[in-house]
């Protein structure tokens, strides 16, 4: 099909829409290899540069992936849902019998193996974290940083910040996995998580984030900054998760009652 020069959309967007439609309807099923750039250019009467722009758009949307030396393929798995409204759910945490944190539960529900690599250090709070935790800038906080894996593929970065006086004698200070989850540790310390505030932003990744998450060029990340409040409405944790935009969709389920 030759692209329509009268269409107000740029040619690469037209081509991306055609390919997206084939993916959505199963004409290009999961795992299928797309025609080469040259074949697509010939078939649609356009240039290879237009084809590259179209394929890059589909990559950013998480619909296709490139394999070095092999070509471009329809992703074999849909973008991963990040169940933001379930993260931290006390009922889920208690039903897991303190053996699996929320991240592990979500990864295992897809039949995958979860793993986290954590580091812990005491640092001065920057302006943002201090404001979220109602601290003075420069006041000491425990910073717990994690690279989170599903089947050995890095899929998330997690950064948790806690008032040091609150957690200094707890297992949160240990970089080992907290199987029952940090919310359970906070509850055991007498600070029951009762509500959360989420702030969601989208941006391009830093060089460190792109390296740790194996993010291809031109792919944005989503950042969810969640502040946890206890039964006295005191902020007890500021948690930042960084999600590759081509691999995740944010999913919220909100009651209308």
Image (cartoon, rainbow, N blue to C red):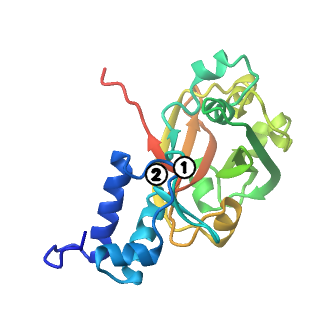
**Residue drawn at (76%, 44%) of the image:** 116
**Residue drawn at (31%, 81%) of the image:** 46
Say whether marks 1 and 2 touch (CB < 8 Å).
yes
Q: Quadrant of residue 212?
A: bottom right
Dot placed on the residue nearer the N-terminal end, 1 or 2: 2
Q: Quadrant of the N terminus?
A: bottom left
Does 121 appear above or below 190?
A: below
Is residue 52 visible in the rendered image? The answer is no
Is the residue marked by circle 2 packed among few (<14), some (14-19), or many (20+) residues within 10 Å? few
Q: Quadrant of residue 189?
A: top right
Between 147 and 149, the residue placed more toward the observer is 149
Q: Secondary structure at mark 1?
A: strand
Q: Give the labeled residue for mark 2.
A: 200
Is the residue marked by circle 1 packed among few (<14), some (14-19), or many (20+) residues within 10 Å? many
Q: Quadrant of the C terminus?
A: top left
Q: Give the labeled residue for mark 1.
A: 225
**Residue drawn at (40%, 75%) of the image:** 51
Where does the image place residue 127, in percent across and percent down from the top left? 60, 61
Distance between the alpha carbons at the discs numbered 1 and 2: 6 Å
Between 191 and 90, the residue placed more toward the observer is 90
Does 86 appear above or below 121?
A: above
């Amino acid at each position: 099909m030759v692209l329509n020069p009268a269409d107000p959309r740029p040619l690469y967007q037209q081509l991306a829409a055609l390919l997206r439609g084939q993916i959505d309807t199963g004409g290009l099923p999961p795992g299928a290899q797309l025609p080469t750039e040259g074949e697509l250019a010939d078939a649609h009467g356009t240039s290879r540069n237009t084809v590259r722009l179209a394929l890059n758009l589909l990559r950013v949307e998480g619909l296709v992936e490139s394999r070095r030396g092999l070509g471009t393929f329809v992703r074999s798995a849909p973008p991963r849902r990040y169940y933001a409204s379930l993260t931290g759910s006390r009922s889920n945490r208690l039903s897991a019998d303190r053996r699996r944190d929320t991240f592990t539960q979500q990864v295992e529900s897809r039949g995958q193996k979860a793993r986290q690599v954590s580091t812990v250090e005491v640092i001065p709070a920057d302006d943002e974290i201090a404001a979220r935790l109602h601290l003075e800038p420069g006041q000491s906080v425990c910073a717990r940083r994690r690279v989170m894996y599903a089947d050995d593929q890095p899929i998330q970065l997690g950064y948790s910040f806690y008032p040091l006086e609150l957690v200094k004698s707890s297992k949160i200070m240990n970089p080992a996995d907290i199987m029952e989850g940090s919310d359970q540790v906070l509850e055991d310390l007498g600070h029951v998580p009762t509500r959360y505030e989420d702030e969601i932003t989208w941006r391009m990744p830093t060089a460190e984030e792109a390296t740790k998450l194996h993010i291809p060029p031109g792919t944005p990340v989503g950042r969810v900054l969640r502040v946890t409040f206890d039964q006295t409405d005191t902020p007890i944790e500021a948690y930042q998760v960084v999600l590759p935009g081509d691999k995740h969709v944010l999913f919220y389920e909100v009651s209308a009652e």
